[in-house]
Image (cartoon, rainbow, N blue to C red):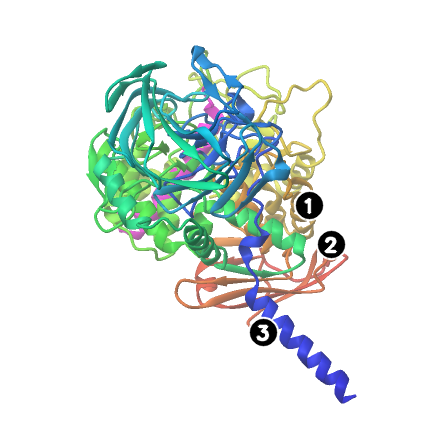
C-alpha cells in the first residue's frame, strides 16, 4: 500500500512539473489561416511588432493577399511587412532572397528576372517568432526570426562559387507598387535606403538599414534590370545582389531594421534591438516574449482545445502594428514626421472588424497597449482632424464604414483605462460630424439614403452610425456635456428610421423617405456592407430591448431561430465574404458575430449555448484552412478566445459580457492589477454544453451577464454543466 501511495505521490509531483514547464507556444500553429479565406501569414513576428518577416510565394491574387498561400509550392523571397487576415493586398516591403548557381526558374513580372525556389511543407517549420524552410531549388536553408523592429535572417548555404543574397525593392504584389526606392552601399557589410510605395496605403514609407554578418565579396546595384556602376542607386525598381563564395553548411546572417520615419531611426533600432549575431538567442527571446503574452490567459483542457485556443490567441496579438521608432519618431497620417512622446505609436487599425471583440479583449489582457492605441487614435486626430477609420502605415484608407474608434475609446474610458477624455470626446464629435462618407446627409435626414451609383451601404451605415452615436452620448453624459449628450442620444435612435414593419427588416430608403423596391432580405445589394438584411437586422447592440420590443418578443424569437435555419438555395449567389454559413448567419464576416448570444436576451440561453458550441466546432480548426473567413486582424480569433471562456460583448462599449457555457475546462485571466479571474467548469465535455447552475466566488449567480468591473476584482465564476438544457434555471438576462 505504501509503495502505491509513493508511486501516486511521485506521479502527482511529475504532473505538476510538466504543467509548470508547459510551453504555450508549442500549441500555436502559425500556418492556421494560410489556406482557404483566412489570409494569414506564417512568418516571424512579435506581439504588435513592426516587422512581419514572412515568406512570399511571389504570385498575386486574392488567395495570396498575405503573401503566402499554403497550396502553393514556390517562394520568391522573404519580405518584412504583411497584413494578417485582411482582404487588402498591400505591404510586402523589402524582399530578401538567397540564391546560388543552381537557380534556373524565374517569375517574370514586367520582364524583370525574379528567381523563385520550389519548397515542400515537409521541409518547413514555424513557431511564434520563428520560421524556417529548405529552398529545394538551391539547397539553401532559410531561417527567420525578429525583434519588434528588426528582421533577422539566417541562411545556410551549400558550397557554391556563386552564392548570393538579393534585396529587391522593386518587388511588389497585388495593390502595392513602388514609387521611389533607394539603396546605398555604406561599406562591405552595410547597406541602407528606403522604399516608398503606393497601394492601399497611398503614401507608405519604409526606411531600412541592412547588415550582413560576412563582408560582401562584391555587389551589383540595379535599376530597371540595368546594372549601375555606383555605390548608390535610385529609381522605382532597384535591387542589390550581394555575392559570396560559400563552403558547405556556411551560415550567413542578415539583419534588417525598419522605420517609417528615417534611416537614422532604423539604425538606432538595429543597434538597440540586435547588437549581436546570435540568431538562436534572438529566436529564444522571441519565444519568451510570445510565452509571456500567451500566458495572459492559461487554460485547462484537451490538447486539441489548447491548440485551438492558443493559435487564436496568437493571432489576436499580431495587430495593430508598432509604427514608431525607439525615439518615438513616425510618419504621420498628414505626411509629416512626428514624435510619439511617452507612448508607442500603433497603426494597422481594422476598426470595422476589431471594435466588436478584439479591442474589448485587449482591455482585459493588454490594457497598457490599449492606452497607447488610444493615444495613437488621438495623434491621428491631431494630424487629420478625425479619428482613424482603417489606418495603415501612417495613412487613412477610409475602408469600410462607421467611426468605430469611438466605441473603442468609450469602452476603454468606462473600464478605467487612462486617457484624455475631454480631447477624446472632441475627437469623437469631429468624426461624427464630418461632411464625408454621407455623414452630413445622415445628420440631415436621420438616415443614409440609397444611392444610384456605386456602393452606398446606406442601411449598414445608418445602423453603425447610430450605434457610434450612442457611444458618444454615454461619454458626453459622463463628462457633464449635456448638449452633446442630448444631440447624440437622439441620433442613437436613428436605427428606427429604416425599420419597415411590413417586412420586419431594415430597408433601404430614398432621400424622399420611400422604401426601395423590390426588396429581398437575403439578397446581397449595394445598400448593405458585405452583408444582407438578415445579417444586419441584429445590429442595434446599444438598444437590443428596443429592437425586441419593436418587433415583439415572439416574432423576434422566431426571426432569430430562422436566422440559423433559413439556408441559401442553390440558385442564390453568395459573395466572397459570405462564408461560415449557418442558415443566414455568416460567421466568416463580422456583422453576425454577436447574434448567437442574443438568445440570452429573450430568456432562451440554452440556444446560445447550443449555437456557440456549434460555431466553435464547425467554423474553427488549427488546419491551414482553419478560419471560415478572413481572420481580420484578430476579430475572428477574439470571438473564439472569448467564447471558449464562456463570454462575449454583445455591446462592445458597455463593459458587459454575455455568458454561455465555456468550451474549455478552465481559464485563468492574469489581470494587470495583479488579480486573477478564473472561469471553471464541472462536467465539461462535448455533450455537456448546457449550464445547470453558476456560482461567483462560491455564491449562487443568477445572471447571464458579468461586468468588466466584476472581473477586475478577481475571483472565480464556476459553471456546472449537463447534457440537457435546464430551462427552469432562474437566470436574469
Kindly identify which residue carries mark 2. 686
- Reading the chain from its start, which is encountered first: label 3 or label 2? 2
Kindly identify which residue carries mark 1. 617
Kindly identify which residue carries mark 3. 698
Residue in the foreground of this view, choosing between 327 and 368: 327
Q: Look at the image and tell me whether residue 358 can be seen.
A: yes
The image shows residue 620 at horizontal and vertical percentages of 64, 42
Within 10 Å of the Cα at label 1, are there few (<14), some (14-19), or many (20+) other Cα atoms? few
What's the distance in space between the residues labelled 3 and 1, CA to CA?
Answer: 30 Å
Above/below status of 1 relative to 388:
below
Above/below status of 221 relative to 165:
above
**Residue plotted at (48% across, 59% down):** 296
Instruction: Judge from the rendering whether residue 373 lies leftward or rightward of residue 724; answer left or right.
Output: left
- Reading the chain from its start, which is encountered first: label 1 or label 2? 1
Q: Look at the image and tell me whether residue 626 can be seen.
A: no
Q: Main secondary structure of the magenta part?
A: helix
Q: Are marks 3 and 2 in contact (CB under 8 Å)?
A: no
**Element at label 1:** helix
What's the distance in space between the residues labelled 1 and 2, CA to CA?
Answer: 9 Å
- Reading the chain from its start, which is encountered first: label 3 or label 1? 1
The image shows residue 105 at horizontal and vertical percentages of 54, 19
Residue in the foreground of this view, choosing between 169 and 562: 169
What's the distance in space between the residues labelled 3 and 2, CA to CA?
Answer: 25 Å
What range is drawn magenta here? 456-484
Q: Are marks 1 and 2 in contact (CB under 8 Å)?
A: yes
Residue in the foreground of this view, choosing between 597 and 9: 9
Of badges 3 and 1, the one in the foreground is: 1
Location of residue 563 by image quarter:
top right
Instruction: Find out whether residue 470 is within the magenta segment.
Output: yes
Image quadrant containing the N terminus? bottom right
Instruction: Find out whether residue 444 is within the magenta segment.
Output: no
Amino acid at each position: 500500500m505504501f509503495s502505491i501511495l509513493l508511486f501516486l505521490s511521485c506521479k502527482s509531483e511529475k504532473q505538476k512539473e510538466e504543467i509548470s514547464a508547459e510551453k504555450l507556444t508549442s500549441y500555436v500553429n502559425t500556418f492556421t489561416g494560410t489556406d482557404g479565406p483566412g489570409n494569414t501569414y506564417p512568418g516571424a513576428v512579435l506581439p504588435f511588432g513592426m516587422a512581419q518577416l514572412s515568406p512570399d510565394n511571389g504570385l498575386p491574387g486574392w488567395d495570396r493577399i498575405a503573401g503566402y498561400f499554403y497550396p502553393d509550392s514556390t517562394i520568391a523571397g522573404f519580405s518584412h511587412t504583411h497584413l494578417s487576415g485582411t482582404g487588402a493586398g498591400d505591404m510586402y516591403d523589402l524582399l530578401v532572397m538567397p540564391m546560388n548557381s543552381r537557380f534556373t526558374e524565374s517569375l517574370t513580372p514586367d520582364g524583370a528576372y525574379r528567381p523563385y525556389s520550389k519548397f515542400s511543407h515537409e521541409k518547413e517549420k514555424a513557431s511564434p517568432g520563428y520560421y524556417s524552410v529548405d529552398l529545394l531549388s538551391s539547397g539553401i536553408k532559410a531561417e527567420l526570426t525578429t525583434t519588434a523592429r528588426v528582421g533577422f535572417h539566417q541562411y545556410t548555404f551549400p558550397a557554391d562559387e556563386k552564392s548570393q543574397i538579393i534585396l529587391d525593392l522593386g518587388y511588389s504584389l497585388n495593390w502595392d507598387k513602388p514609387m521611389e526606392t533607394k539603396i546605398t552601399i555604406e561599406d562591405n557589410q552595410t547597406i541602407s535606403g528606403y522604399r516608398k510605395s503606393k497601394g492601399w496605403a497611398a503614401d507608405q514609407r519604409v526606411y531600412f538599414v541592412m547588415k550582413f554578418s560576412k563582408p560582401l565579396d562584391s555587389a551589383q546595384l540595379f535599376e530597371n534590370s540595368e546594372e549601375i556602376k555606383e555605390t548608390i542607386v535610385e529609381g522605382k525598381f532597384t535591387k542589390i545582389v550581394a555575392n559570396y563564395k560559400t563552403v558547405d553548411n556556411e551560415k550567413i546572417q542578415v539583419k534588417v531594421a525598419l522605420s517609417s520615419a528615417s534611416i537614422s531611426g532604423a539604425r538606432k533600432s538595429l543597434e538597440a534591438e540586435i547588437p549581436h549575431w546570435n540568431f538562436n538567442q534572438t529566436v529564444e527571446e522571441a519565444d519568451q516574449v510570445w510565452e509571456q503574452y500567451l500566458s495572459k490567459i492559461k487554460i485547462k483542457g484537451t490538447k486539441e482545445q489548447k491548440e485551438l485556443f492558443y493559435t487564436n490567441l496568437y493571432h489576436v496579438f499580431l495587430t495593430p502594428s508598432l509604427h514608431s521608432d525607439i525615439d518615438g519618431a513616425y510618419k504621420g497620417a498628414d505626411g509629416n514626421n512626428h514624435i510619439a512622446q511617452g507612448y508607442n505609436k500603433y497603426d494597422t487599425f481594422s476598426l470595422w472588424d476589431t471594435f466588436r471583440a478584439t479591442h474589448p479583449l485587449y482591455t482585459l489582457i493588454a490594457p497598457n497597449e490599449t492606452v497607447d492605441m488610444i493615444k495613437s487614435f488621438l495623434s491621428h486626430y491631431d494630424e487629420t482632424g478625425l479619428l482613424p477609420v482603417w489606418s495603415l502605415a501612417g495613412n487613412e484608407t477610409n475602408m469600410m464604414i462607421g467611426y468605430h474608434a469611438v466605441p473603442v475609446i468609450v469602452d476603454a474610458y468606462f473600464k478605467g483605462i487612462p486617457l484624455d477624455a475631454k480631447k477624446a470626446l472632441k475627437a469623437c464629435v469631429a468624426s461624427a460630424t464630418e461632411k464625408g462618407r454621407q455623414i452630413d446627409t445622415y445628420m440631415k435626414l436621420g438616415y443614409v439614403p440609397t444611392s444610384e451609383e456605386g456602393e452606398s451601404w446606406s442601411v449598414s451605415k445608418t445602423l453603425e452610425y447610430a450605434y457610434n452615436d450612442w457611444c458618444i452620448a454615454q461619454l458626453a453624459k459622463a463628462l457633464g456635456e449635456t448638449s452633446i449628450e442630448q444631440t447624440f442620444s437622439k441620433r442613437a435612435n436613428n436605427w428606427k428610421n429604416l425599420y419597415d414593419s411590413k417586412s420586419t427588416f431594415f430597408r433601404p430608403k430614398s432621400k424622399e423617405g420611400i422604401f426601395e423596391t423590390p426588396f429581398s432580405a437575403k439578397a446581397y445589394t449595394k445598400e448593405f456592407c458585405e452583408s444582407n438584411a438578415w445579417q444586419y437586422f441584429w445590429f442595434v447592440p446599444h438598444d437590443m430591448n428596443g429592437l425586441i420590443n419593436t418587433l415583439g418578443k415572439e416574432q423576434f424569437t422566431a426571426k432569430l431561430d430562422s436566422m440559423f435555419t433559413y439556408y441559401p438555395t442553390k440558385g442564390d449567389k453568395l459573395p466572397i465574404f459570405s462564408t461560415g454559413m449557418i442558415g443566414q448567419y455568416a460567421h466568416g464576416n463580422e456583422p453576425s458575430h454577436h447574434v448567437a448570444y442574443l438568445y440570452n436576451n429573450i430568456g432562451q440561453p440554452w440556444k446560445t449555448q447550443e449555437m456557440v458550441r456549434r460555431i466553435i466546432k464547425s467554423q474553427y480548426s488549427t488546419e491551414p484552412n482553419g478560419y471560415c473567413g478572413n481572420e481580420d486582424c484578430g476579430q475572428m480569433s477574439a470571438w473564439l478566445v472569448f467564447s471558449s471562456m464562456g463570454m462575449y460583448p454583445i455591446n462592445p462599449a458597455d463593459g458587459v459580457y454575455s455568458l454561455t457555457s465555456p468550451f474549455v475546462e478552465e481559464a485563468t485571466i492574469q489581470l494587470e492589477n495583479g488579480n486573477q479571474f478564473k472561469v471553471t467548469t464541472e462536467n465539461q465535455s462535448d455533450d455537456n454544453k448546457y449550464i445547470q447552475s453558476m456560482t461567483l466566488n462560491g455564491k449562487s449567480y443568477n445572471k447571464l451577464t458579468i461586468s468588466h468591473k466584476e472581473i477586475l476584482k478577481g475571483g472565480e465564476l464556476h459553471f456546472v454543466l449537463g447534457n440537457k438544457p435546464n430551462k427552469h434555471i432562474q437566470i436574469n438576462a
